Structures are given as structure tokens and as C-alpha cells.
Amino acid sequence: MNFPKLIANWKMNGSSKLVKEWLEEAQDKIPKDYQTKCLFCPPVCYISDASKLISRTDSDLLLGAQDIDAHSSKSLTGGISGSMLSDLGCTFVIIGHSERRINFKEKEIIIEKLKSALSSNINVIYCVGEDSSEKESGNTTKKIIDQLSVLKGLNPKNLMIAYEPIWAIGTGNNASSEYIRDVHSVIKNELENLLSSNTDIPIAYGGSIDTSNVETIVKTQYVDGLLIGGASLKAAEFSEIAKISLNF
Ligand code: PEP
């Protein structure tokens, strides 16, 4: 599977106009052969627009969703299934983001969402991360291992992990290289325990990445990709991050 190196998570931001402008600028500024490594995740209401623009402009950017429903065939008002996302050209979905765990109280449903995505052949970016009190009380490893446990028995072929410490998301306070390396190493070991031993699941880091810290983070051992929120909203900044990271 061609996993992305950069993931632009727009969260609940944007408009049709901004999506169009962003895609045109990103298509222009990100080197063509690196576009296949960049995944654009706009709000679900703009996925259709984005999909058409990506094919019309002959862009190679990947398209992803920020959420998926747990059921694929059920009477579910407001539901969005994996086959619908697939129909629109989405090849990835973010599951387990801390903002959904906290604001939508997602917990047990996460395993259903994982199964739903994988059964529709949508690749999953599964987010894990500790909050500041878990970090301060030395419980980071425990939290990560607990969040990874839902992956047991799933097919690892279509999985990517995003390690996103909650205290680093949108705070301007990114984790240090050493800290990221240590947590990613815990994740790698735990994935080997949970899944078959020779799986090589990529692990992205997310949390306050910008043009000033991306080089240090992307060079960090065990970092296979980056998940970017705030700094992905402007195409110029995201493209600059892409240019810095493509050398690593
Ligand atoms: C995110 O949305 O997951 C994220 C990492 O946001 P930010 O880059 O703004 O910290």
C-alpha cells in the first residue's frame, strides 16, 4: 500500500472556495511525484468537490475522510459508509482522533469503525495519544498500549498509526524528538505483539507540526509520516512542509 508521508487534517475548517484554492495551490507547489505521498482530509461535505477537482486538475494528491460510520448497511440517518467514501475516491480514513474520542465520547464504537473501514478496503489511520495528566503521571505507555489493543486480530495490511499526544495538538507545544522516538518504539513493539511479527505498520507523528520544527521531527527515528492540523490549512505552508520533508 502507498501510505502517505503527510496527512492534512482540516478538521471542521474550510469552505468550497478554500478547498478549490488550496487544491490548486498545492497541486502547483508540491512536486508531482511527492503528491502521491500527501493525503488531503477535508470535512466530509467537501470530499465530493475535492475529488472532482483532484481528477480535473490531474493532481496526484490522495483523498481521505476524517470519519466513517460503524455500519455499512443499516437504516442510519446521517450515516456515511465506507463504500460511499470509496465511491468519492477516498482511500484513507482517520479513526480514533482524540477530538472524536473526547467530544463524541467515542470508545467502544472505534473497533466497529475500524472493521467497517477495513471491510470496505479503506485504509485506516488509527490515532493514539496520551493527555497531559497521563504524561505527567508516567502513564503514557499504558495509555498507548490500551488504545492499540483494539487492533488485535485485524488485518495489518491497511493500517497506519498516528501518534498524537493530546497535549501537543493545536497547542504550539510539539513533542521532542527523543520523546517521539521513544513512544514510536513502544508502538512498534506493541504492534509486533498484537499482530503478526513481520508487519511493518507505518507510524506518523502529529501535534503542532509547522515549518519551523518539521525537519527535526521528520528526521526522528521511527517517524514514517506526519499528521498536520493547523499548519495544513494554508496551501503555501503545507507545501513548504512537503518540500522540507520530501528530502527525508
Ligand atoms: C491534528 O489535527 O491531529 C493535529 C495534529 O493538529 P495540529 O497540527 O494543529 O496540532
Image (cartoon, rainbow, N blue to C red):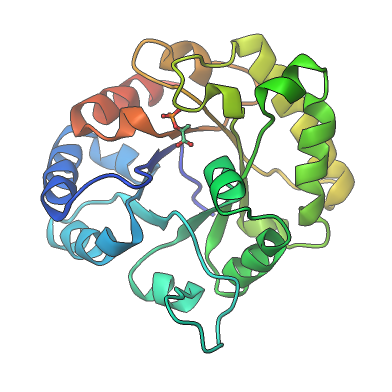
Of all residues, the one furthest to the right in this rendering is: 193
Query: Number of marks in the image?
Result: 0
In the image, what residue occupies the spot 67% across and 10% down?
Answer: 178
* Left or right: 242, with 66 as reference point: left
The foreground one among 158 and 133 is 133
The foreground one among 155 and 134 is 134
Q: Residue 208, can we see it?
A: yes
* Left or right: 47, with 221 as reference point: left
* Left or right: 191, with 37 as reference point: right
Q: Is residue 44 above or below residue 172?
A: below
**What x and y, as percent, mark residue 60?**
28, 51
In the image, what residue occupies the spot 44% across and 26% down?
Answer: 170
Q: Residue 188, can we see it?
A: no
The foreground one among 143 and 89 is 143
The foreground one among 73 and 99 is 99
Rendered-image quadrant of the N terminus: bottom right
In the image, what residue occupies the spot 33% across and 38% down?
Answer: 34
Q: Is residue 74 above or below residue 54?
A: below
Q: Is residue 106 above or below residue 231?
A: below
Q: Within the image, what quadrant is residue 138 found in? A: top right
**What x and y, as percent, mark residue 241?**
33, 24
Q: Within the image, what quadrant is residue 156 found in? A: bottom right
**What x and y, as percent, mark residue 65?**
42, 57
Ligand 1 quadrant assignment: top left
